[in-house]
Structure formats: structure tokens, C-alpha cells
Image (spheres, rainbow, N blue to C red):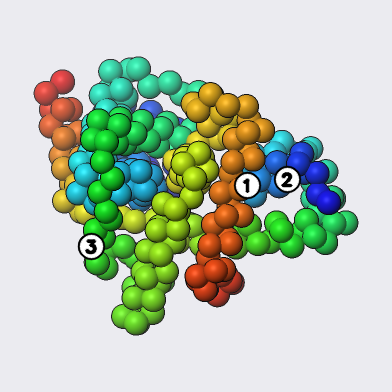
């Protein structure tokens, strides 16, 4: 049974929010705990999937933003 | 000067000093993440495009007027603006429009994707579309923390403060969001580990 605190550390670990010391300790725990390591791998795969999920706005919208900024600079 | 290798913080400083190229690079660096953050909340491409403009216009005025706070990351800051505008819009509208995604090559505008076959692109887009639908099916609190952390790039501490819960609660919600998402993907036979090592 994995402790809740360990689960929270895992979430912070995969999102790179653990301090360096905590990260090292957690990685030592991962090396010893097969189940936790598997769970970690699953979440990292899912994270990868979600990263492929990004949508791009239209070029027209981006050009409007850039033009707005340039025009504002000219006015100042 | 090679602006491409500069950090966000350095680009912001250059932009405030009048360098428009620095701003263009900032926009191009963060546009997809900001746009996706908005899209997952408002669920409508055209509205998301409008809110993306509003987000960057707000950012432009903040930076140009010298009110930009250097403390946090630029990516978290811009995504937080986007998140707040999207939530405001959603509350005002009080409706739930269905996603009407337009097909287009700009969705996968990297070189790696450009070399893929039409069929491969279609499969990838179908998978992403189903994944977006699964995210929408998550309980509201879990969906919120997933969008804030994964897409809006906010830290768990920032999420806890924004949503008025403890950091452990925010972490717990994220954990259940990921677990539930994974279960749903498995149930719907969404390919879970294919192409993991393709990069």
C-alpha cells in the first residue's frame, strides 16, 4: 500500500516540483519500490500523451496580436 | 543577438525596452499552450481565438506600462491571465457549447509531424480529439486542476491559492484526474503507450 504522501510526491515529481534534495530521496524510493516505479512510468506516459494534445491558434490571430503590439509601440 | 536562445525573462526585458521581435518570439513560444488552456475551458475554437487575443492584449498593456512582476515564470503568468479570462467568459455565458474542431495542418505544425502520412495524422488527431472529450468528462475539480497544471503551467502552490484549497488537496485532485483519465483511455482502447520512444 503506497502512502498518500508518497502519491503526492509522485505527482510533484512528474511535474518537476520537488526540491533537489526531495527529488533525490524520491528517486531512491522509486528504485526500491517496483509498484511505485510502474505507477510513475504510467503517469509519465500519460503526461506525454497530454503534451501531444496542444492545439495551435490560427496565424491570423497571431498576426493580429503582433500588429496590435507594434501599433501600440508606434503610438507611445 | 540571437533572441531564440534567450529566456522568457530576458525576452520580456527586451520587449519592455522596445524590441518587438522579442515579443513575437514570446508569443510563438507560448501560443499553443495558452490557446489549449482556453480551448479546454470554453470548448469553442472561435471563442478561444478571441480570448487568446484578449489574453495577449492584456499582457501587452501590463508589460508596456511597467506593471509586469518579474517574480514568477512568464508562462505561468500568461496562462493564468488566459485561464481567468476563459473562466470569466464561461461564467458570463453560462452555456456549454460543443467542440467544433476545424481540421488543419497547423495543428501539427512541427517538422516531425509534417513528414507523417495523412492517415497517420488523421489517427493522431482522432486520438487527441477523444482525449479532449475524456478530459471534459472528468469531475469539475479534477478537470480544473489538470488544465491549470498541465496546460496553464501553474505550480501546485499557485493552484492551491487560486482555488482556495490546500496543496495536498490540489495534488490529490491531480492524481485522481490522471488516474481517471488513464482508466477512461484504457476503457476506450485509446493507444496508451505507442510512440512513447519515437522522439
Chain where mark 2 sits: A
| Circle 1 residue | B175
| Circle 3 residue | B102
Measured Cα–Cα span from mark 1 to mark 3 = 31 Å
Label 1: element kind: helix
Q: Residue at x 78, y 56 (%)?
A: A36
**Does label 2 lie on the same chain as label 3?**
no
Q: Residue at x 49, y 45 (%)?
A: B139
Q: Earlier in the sequence, mark 1 or mark 3?
A: 3
Measured Cα–Cα span from mark 3 to mark 2 = 38 Å
Judge left or right: residue A17 versus residue B70.
right
Instruction: Say if mark 2 contacts mark 1, CB within 8 Å.
Output: yes
Mark 1: give few (<14), some (14-19) or many (20+) Cα within 10 Å: many
| Circle 2 residue | A7
Mark 3: give few (<14), some (14-19) or many (20+) Cα within 10 Å: few
Q: Residue at x 81, y 49 (%)?
A: A2
Residue B73 higher or lower than B109, as above or below: above
Looking at the picture, how far across and down is residue B87, in whole percent? 34, 34
Measured Cα–Cα span from mark 2 to mark 1 = 8 Å
Instruction: Say if mark 1 contacts mark 3, CB within 8 Å.
Output: no
Quadrant location of the C terminus of chain A in the rendered image: top left
Residue B18 higher or lower than A43, as above or below: above
**Does label 1 lie on the same chain as label 2?**
no
Amino acid at each position: 500500500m503506497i502512502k498518500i504522501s508518497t502519491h503526492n510526491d509522485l505527482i510533484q515529481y512528474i511535474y518537476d516540483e520537488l526540491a533537489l534534495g526531495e527529488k533525490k530521496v524520491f528517486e531512491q524510493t522509486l528504485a526500491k519500490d517496483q509498484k511505485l516505479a510502474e505507477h510513475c512510468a504510467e503517469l509519465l506516459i500519460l503526461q506525454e500523451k497530454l503534451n501531444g494534445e496542444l492545439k495551435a491558434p490560427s496565424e491570423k490571430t497571431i498576426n493580429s496580436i503582433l500588429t496590435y503590439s507594434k501599433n501600440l509601440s508606434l503610438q507611445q | 543577438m540571437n533572441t531564440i536562445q534567450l529566456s522568457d525573462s530576458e525576452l520580456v526585458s527586451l520587449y519592455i525596452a522596445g524590441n518587438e521581435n522579442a515579443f513575437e518570439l514570446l508569443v510563438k513560444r507560448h501560443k499553443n499552450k495558452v490557446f489549449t488552456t482556453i480551448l479546454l475551458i470554453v470548448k469553442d475554437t472561435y471563442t478561444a481565438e478571441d480570448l487568446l487575443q484578449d489574453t495577449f492584449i492584456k499582457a501587452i498593456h501590463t508589460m508596456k506600462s511597467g506593471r509586469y512582476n518579474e517574480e514568477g515564470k512568464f508562462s505561468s503568468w500568461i496562462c493564468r491571465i488566459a485561464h481567468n479570462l476563459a473562466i470569466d467568459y464561461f461564467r458570463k455565458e453560462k452555456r456549454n457549447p460543443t467542440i467544433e474542431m476545424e481540421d488543419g495542418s497547423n495543428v501539427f505544425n512541427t517538422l516531425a509531424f509534417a513528414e507523417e502520412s495523412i492517415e497517420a495524422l488523421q489517427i493522431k488527431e482522432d486520438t487527441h480529439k477523444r482525449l479532449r472529450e475524456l478530459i471534459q468528462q472528468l469531475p469539475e475539480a479534477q478537470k480544473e486542476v489538470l488544465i491549470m497544471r498541465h496546460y496553464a503551467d501553474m505550480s501546485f502552490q499557485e493552484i492551491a491559492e487560486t482555488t482556495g484549497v490546500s496543496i495536498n488537496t490540489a495534488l490529490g485532485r491531480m492524481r485522481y484526474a490522471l488516474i481517471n483519465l488513464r482508466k477512461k483511455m484504457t476503457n476506450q482502447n485509446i493507444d496508451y503507450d505507442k510512440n512513447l520512444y519515437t522522439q
